[in-house]
Amino acid sequence: MSAERKTIFVVDDNLTNLTVAKSVLGDAYNISTISSGERLFKMLERSIPDLILLDISMPGMSGYDVIKVLKSNSKTFDIPVVFLTALDSEEIEYEGLSLGAIDYITKPFSPPLLLKRIEVHLLVESQKKELVNYANNLEIMVEEKIRTVVELKNVVLKTMAELVEHRDEITGGHIDRTQRYVKVLIDAMKASGVYLDEVNRWDEKLVIQSSQLHDVGKISVKDSILFKPGKLTYDEFEEIKNHTVFGEKVISNLINSTSDSEFLEYARIFAISHHEKWNGKGYPKGLAGDEIPLLGRMMAIADVYDALVTDRPYKVAFSHRTAVDIITADSGSHFDPALVELFVGVNDKFSKISGQ
C-alpha cells in the first residue's frame, strides 16, 4: 500500500510551515520536508517526487530561483510545482505561473483546502502520464500496424513474383537477379550523379521491391510459346510481346483497388516499359530516348544481361564478357548510352550476381 503513495517534497525555510504541511498531508502522502532550495537539489539527486510544494520567499535561493533550475533540467522539468506564499498579489502569481508553476496556495493554508488541491493536482498529473503512455503505446501500435502492412505488401510482391518464376521455370532466379542488378544501377546513378534528380524522387526500397513484377505478364503466355526451343513465329512473338501489356493491366487493376499504390505504380512502369528501346524500335509502344521511363531503361539492361548469361530454351548462356560486349555495342540503339556507361563501370558487380 505504501508503495502506491505519492511522494511530496515541501520546501520552506519556516519550520512551523513544514510541520503543519507534514501534519496535514502525512496521512495521505509520503512527505519530505526540506528547509532550503540548496537542500532540495541534494534530495533530487537521490529521489524524484510526484509534486513539490515550494515557498517563494526563502533566504539564499528563492522559490523563483529554484523553479528556474528545475525547469532547465530534463530530469526535473516535469515535476509539478505548487508555490506557497504569504503574499496575495496578481504580479507574484503571474510571475510564478510564467516560470512553470501549476498553482499557488496562500499561507496560512486551510488544511482541507490544501489536501483537496494537492489531490486534484496529483490526479491531473497522473492522468497526463496515462495519456502520454497511451500516446506512446498508440504510436507503437501504429508502427506495428504499418510494419504489418509493409510485410503484407512484400508478401504480395513475393508471391506474385514467385508465381511468375514457377510459370517460367527455365529462367529460375531471374527475378531475384534482376532485382539486384537494378540496385547496382541505382547505386551507380547516385554515385555518379547521372539522373540524380529523378532518382532522389523515388522511394528506392519500393522501386527495388516492385521490380520483381516486371515479368508478371508472362502468366498470360502459352507454355508452347514460353518453352519453345526454336525460333518463334511472327504470331508467337506478338503473343510474347503482349506480356508487357497484360502485366500493366494486371497491376493497374490492383492500383485501382487500393489507396496506397506507390509501389504498384513503380511495378506498372517496369512491366510496360522494360522492352522499349532507345531507338524507338522496342515494344509495346515504340517509345524512344527519354520518352522511355528511366525505370524501364534500367530494367532493359538488367533483363537483357540476365537473358544473355543464362541458358534459355533457344540458346546456351553467353559468358559475362560477351554479354558486356553485346550491351556495349547496343548503346544508343537498344540501351540508354548514359546507363550503358554506368553498367560498364559496375559490370564486375553484375558478374558476381550472375555467378559468371
Image: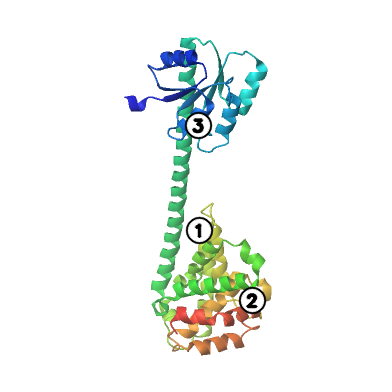
Q: Which residue is mark 2?
A: 286
Badge 3 marks a residue whose secondary structure is helix
Specify the farthest residue to the front.
60
Badge 1 marks a residue whose secondary structure is helix
Quarter that holds the C terminus: bottom left
Categorize mark 2 by other alpha carbons within 10 Å: few (<14), some (14-19), many (20+). some
The colour scheme used here is rainbow
Q: Is residue 96 above or below residue 19?
A: below
Specify the farthest residue to the left.
1
Q: Which residue is mark 1?
A: 254
Locate residue 253, reporting x and y percent.
Answer: 52, 59
Residue 41's disc is 3
Q: Is residue 198 visible?
A: yes
Q: Earlier in the sequence, mark 1 or mark 2?
A: 1
- Residue shown at 46% from the left, 24% from the top: 9
Alpha carbons under labels 2 and 3: distance apart? 77 Å
Alpha carbons under labels 1 and 2: distance apart? 25 Å
| Amino acid type of the residue that numbered disc 3 sits on in the rendered structure | Phe
Alpha carbons under labels 3 and 1: distance apart? 63 Å
Categorize mark 3 by other alpha carbons within 10 Å: few (<14), some (14-19), many (20+). some
| Amino acid type of the residue that numbered disc 1 sits on in the rendered structure | Leu
Q: Earlier in the sequence, mark 2 or mark 3?
A: 3
Q: Is residue 48 above or below residue 223?
A: above
- Foreground mark, 2 or 3? 3
Q: Are marks 3 and 1 in contact (CB under 8 Å)?
A: no
| Amino acid type of the residue that numbered disc 2 sits on in the rendered structure | Gly
Badge 2 marks a residue whose secondary structure is loop
Locate residue 167, reporting x and y percent.
Answer: 40, 73
Quarter that holds the N terminus: top left
Q: Is residue 16 above or below residue 203?
A: above
